[in-house]
Image (cartoon, rainbow, N blue to C red):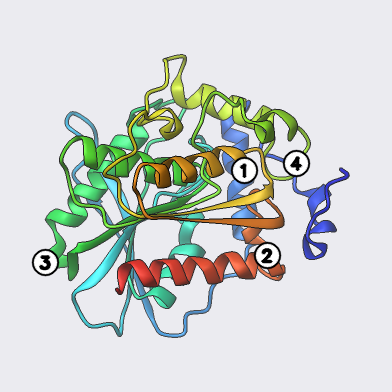
Amino acid sequence: MTHDFDPDLADAAPRLRPLDYADPVSARAALRAVMARQPRHEPVSEVLVRDQTVPGPVGAPGVVVRLHRPAARVDPLPALVFPHWGGFVTGDLDTVDTAATRIADLVGAVVVSPDYRLAPEHPYPAGLEDCYAALEWTVAEAAALGVDTDRVAVGGFSAGGALAAGLALLARDRSGPRVCFQYLLFPQLDDRLTTPSARSFVDTPMLDRRSLELSWGHYLGGAAASGHAAPARAEDLSGLPPAFVGVCEYDPLRDEGIDYAHRLAASGVETELAHYSGAFHGSIGLAHAASSRRMIADQVTALRRALHP
């Protein structure tokens, strides 16, 4: 690779090969191994964690959600529905533990992470509908959860960002729960893969064009993509909640995130766009890097501003 990575990331970059989504079972095991080696967030104050099964979509099984809740905060709290990443193919509730604990602790919010059904066994719309069921449950059970229904946001990284953006669109189009904010970090939004970054980044760490092709193929299952499945395809972005969109310089998803942020702004949606120079997809997991520290600081600032106005 000849990319000009952040010096803090350069040594690790060649070792961080994309997951092989051609073999979903092996890819899932590989992601679990990677996440098990990640340093944990040590909360400033206690964060309570529990799993619960909530009603699923009509005709589908219940959805297990993991709740991260700051113990010392006074109700009512804001909430963030936070699907995990993993290319729609990999990941589970443990994948987001560190990020969800950090958000609950430093932002002061109840984080609701759904264990949605994965492709290719369960192609679109299964995963998105599971996440929507979790969003509906969060609002319906707000009193029991100690959640303020005026401060329910959605957010996610990568495929989790696609699901979060899809949730914002679904909630608008179905006149469903009110979503106050969407936090999208290096979101996976466009199955067409026609942007300059999607065309050129065939050798980048963590994610490259080939892995994206496989990811979208599994998720869509051969069907045509809708604007809810691939939010970049949505023709109308008006009426969506304010957004923070973060992209990494050496990420095939970079340009679709930038394009989406520009389209949100052009549609009258209050939007903040952050570009992380020298960073690559998922490099936030290398927490010692300056670019990763900035991503985390921006994340906390954006969510605090949106959820504790």
Q: Nearer the viewer, mark 4 or mark 3?
A: 4
Of labels 2 and 1, earlier in sequence is 1
Name the mark nearer the viewer: 1 or 3: 1
Residue at left offset 80%, top offset 55%: 5
- For residue 291, the mark is 2
Query: Label 1: few (<14), some or many (≥20) within 10 Å?
Result: many
Instruction: Name which of mark 1 and mark 4 comes first in the sequence.
Output: 4
Residue at the image position 55 percent from the left and 29 percent from the top: 215
Q: Residue at x 38, y 36 (%)?
A: 117
Mark toward the viewer: 4 or 2:
2
Residue 25 location (% of width, % of height): 57, 33
Dot in front, 1 or 4 = 1
Name which residue type carries label 3: Ala
Residue 62 in view of the camera: no
Q: Earlier in the sequence, mark 4 or mark 3?
A: 3
In the figure, 34 relative to 236: above or below?
Answer: below
Q: Residues within 10 Å of mark 3 (few under 14, many from 20)?
A: few
Q: CA distance from mark 2 to mark 1?
A: 15 Å
Q: Residue at x 39, y 74 (%)?
A: 107
Badge 3 element:
helix
How far is the residue under mark 4 from the one under mark 2?
17 Å
Q: Quadrant of the C terminus?
A: bottom left
Q: Quadrant of the N terminus?
A: top right
**Which residue has dot 1 on it?**
254
Between discs 1 and 3, the one toward the N terminus: 3
Separation (CA) of disc 1 from disc 4: 12 Å
Gap between marks 1 and 3 measured at Cα: 39 Å
Label 4 belongs to which residue? Answer: 204
The numbered disc on residue 143 is 3
Within-10-Å neighbours for mark 2: few <14, some 14–19, many 20+: many
